[in-house]
Image: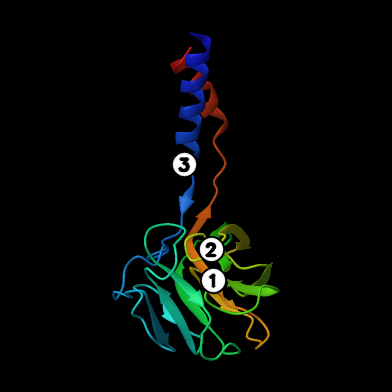
């Protein structure tokens, strides 16, 4: 009986953490909404064919069935198979609260259809800051080798920009990005713990 109460208590705490965590309004975080890419589709600078996102690099690959997405059926590939040194990037602006701390969570992998096995670099720009992620190796189309990354920032205005870009060097291979989430954690109020204990005692 005690173990059941503990499980209920843990579940309730989890619900509270979710309910009290403010989430930024990032549109189409999994790239699922947009033109049908088929296997994959080349999109050029200025394209908004992926709803909510703008292609800010020269070109990118909008992935469908050519490789396995981390979540859902679509993802983006920051590379071009014909021009390996070209800049590839995607961008979005979303609402924020000045002074609030945010965390960008995302998944990335080496593109299985592009480049060498070593030294792939992903640049994440959030609210004016920049963080570079490095990955080595190359996965298969069925298992690209997805891993999670995160970037934290403090909002200084009522909106912030988020961009994912390759480090455009002809020696580097491409990267995949998927399942992007922006959250602003909010501490649980001290009184909440007592309320939970009383309810499930």
Real-space CA distance between mark 2 and mark 3, rounded to the nearest whole angstrom: 30 Å
Residue with the mark numbered 2 = 144
Residue for point 70% across, 74% down: 119
Residue with the mark numbered 1 = 112
Residue 15, horizontal then vertical, whole percent: 45, 35
Q: How crowded is mark 2: few (under 14 residues within 10 Å), some or many (20 or more)?
A: many
Residue 146, horizontal then vertical, whole percent: 55, 59
In depth, the one of 133 and 183 nearer the eye is 133
Q: Is mark 3 on a helix, strand or loop?
A: helix
In depth, the one of 122 and 162 nearer the eye is 122
The way the protein has been coloured in the rendering is: rainbow
State the mark number for residue 52: none
Q: In the image, which is nearer the foreground, mark 2 or mark 3?
A: 2
Quadrant location of residue 63?
Answer: bottom left
- The correct choice, above or below, for 108 with respect to 49 in the image is above
Q: In this view, does 68 lie to the left or right of 38?
A: right
Q: Is mark 1 on a helix, strand or loop?
A: loop
Query: Do the residues under discs 2 and 1 have CB atoms within 8 angstroms?
Result: yes
- The correct choice, above or below, for 85 with respect to 129 in the image is below
Q: Is mark 2 on a helix, strand or loop?
A: loop
Residue 141 visible in the snapshot: yes
Residue with the mark numbered 3 = 18
Residue for point 31% across, 73% down: 34
Real-space CA distance between mark 2 and mark 1, rounded to the nearest whole angstrom: 6 Å
């Amino acid at each position: 009986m005690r173990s059941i109460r503990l499980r209920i208590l843990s579940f309730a705490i989890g619900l509270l953490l979710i309910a009290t965590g403010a989430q930024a309004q990032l549109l189409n975080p999994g790239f699922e909404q947009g033109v049908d890419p088929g296997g994959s589709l080349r999109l050029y600078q200025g394209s908004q064919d992926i709803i909510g996102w703008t292609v800010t690099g020269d070109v990118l690959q909008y992935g469908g069935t050519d490789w396995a997405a981390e979540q859902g059926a679509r993802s983006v590939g920051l590379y071009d198979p014909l021009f390996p040194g070209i800049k590839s990037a995607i961008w979005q602006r979303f609402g924020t609260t000045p002074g609030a701390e945010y965390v960008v969570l995302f998944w990335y992998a080496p593109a299985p259809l592009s480049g060498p096995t070593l030294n792939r670099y992903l640049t994440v720009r959030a609210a004016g800051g920049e963080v570079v992620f490095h990955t080595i190796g190359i996965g298969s189309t069925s298992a690209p080798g997805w891993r999670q990354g995160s970037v934290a920032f403090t909002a200084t205005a009522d909106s912030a920009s988020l961009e994912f870009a390759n480090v455009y060097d002809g020696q580097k291979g491409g990267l995949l990005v998927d399942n992007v989430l922006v959250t602003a954690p909010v501490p649980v109020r001290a009184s909440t713990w007592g309320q939970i204990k009383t309810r499930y005692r």
